[in-house]
Image: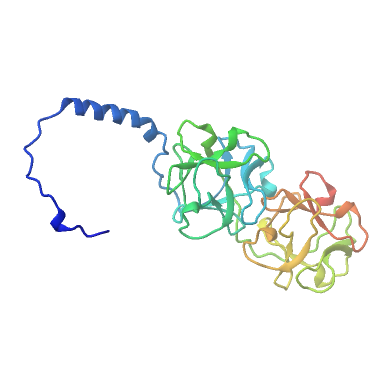
Amino acid sequence: MRTPNLRQLDIQPTPPALKPNLNLAVMLTVVALALLPAVLSKPLPRQTTTSTSTVYIHPNGNTDFCLGAAGSRNGALVDIFDCAMKSESTPTWTLDTDKKRFQLNGTQMCLDAGADITDGVSMKIWQCYDNLPQQQWSYNTDDQHFAVASGSECLDLHDGHVVDGAYTQTWQCSNDNTNQKWTTSESNVSTTPPTSQAQVFHPKGNTKKCLEVYGNIANGSPIEIADCDGTNHQNWVLSRGSTVVKLAGTNFCLDAGEDIRNGATMKLWQCYEGLAQQTFYYTDDNRIAVEGRGQCLDLTGGILEDGNVMQTWACTAGNRNQIWD
């Protein structure tokens, strides 16, 4: 700030007290009433909640659809999809009211509004950073809005389309806009699986074949089917629910790769805590699903010959290629 030049200051005498101006009062009242809708359009102040909770997020109370992300990389778009089969692989979000951020469970990625927070910006996930303005949010349980903490933009379902793959954006907060209403439901997903015993996995109905690591225990070694032989290459440690699938006695895990899609080759890789492609959900009907991606460990083509390398494929109830006894 520049220092004023005192010699140039024109000091005026104190004016006499002004008489009340009724016209001015009327004008101020009109202006205040005109601004009232804009004030009311903003979300209510953030309510006090527990500091951390893990939840599913649904558009406008529709629990058949969930908020997720189209991948696990920086910049992956945030969208919604059918989440009727929650027990398999539906993404959950960890809401941390202390850090004001929403983190995709099983990853180091957070809901991110981008550097240019304005109407129509597509929502994405990005590596979590403490105190990053575009990753700081508030959730009001009264008006059910997710609002960027540093402004007046809210998480908005584009055009209100409740269909698979519908993307989300930021938009000026409005209490009456149902595209901005989001409800949560509790998740019992645990990020710390209990201690488990090593076990082998057989493709459905065939106890002579086992899931194994082919070749050396090293990054990139393929996961295949082979005759059961009792070696450590076929012993796995995991637990029901959210889990990693670790090769017993090692620090190597089942890994679906960064491009999680139909036909992606399964491999072994060094275990990293919170890595999306190593975070699975072991279902009650014995499927091993990549958590939050709708993809399951799949016996490629249903072929039981030794050396058949496993893949990921869209989880389907009753698909024998995805059931591991």
Q: Is residue 314 visible?
A: yes
* Residue name at image x 68 percent, y 68 percent: 271
* Residue name at image x 46 percent, y 56 percent: 99
55 or 148: which is nearer to us?
Answer: 148
- As drawn, is 261 to the left or to the right of 214? left
Q: Is residue 325 visible?
A: no
* Residue name at image x 46 percent, y 34 percent: 174
Image-quadrant location for residue 56: top right
Task: Please state, as top left, top right, bottom left or bottom right, where the C terminus lies in the image.
Answer: bottom right
135 or 218: which is nearer to us?
Answer: 135
Q: Is residue 307 above or below residue 163?
A: below
Task: Please state, as top left, top right, bottom left or bottom right, where the N terminus lies in the image.
Answer: bottom left
299 or 218: which is nearer to us?
Answer: 218
Q: In this view, does 66 lie above or below 261?
A: above
Furthest-front residue in view?
8
Picture coordinates of residue 268, whole percent (x, y)? 76, 66
Furthest-right residue in view?
305
Q: In this view, does 79 lie above or below 213?
A: above
Picture coordinates of residue 121, whole percent (x, y)? 55, 44
Image-quadrant location for residue 40: top left
Display colour scheme: rainbow
* Residue name at image x 47 percent, y 42 percent: 153
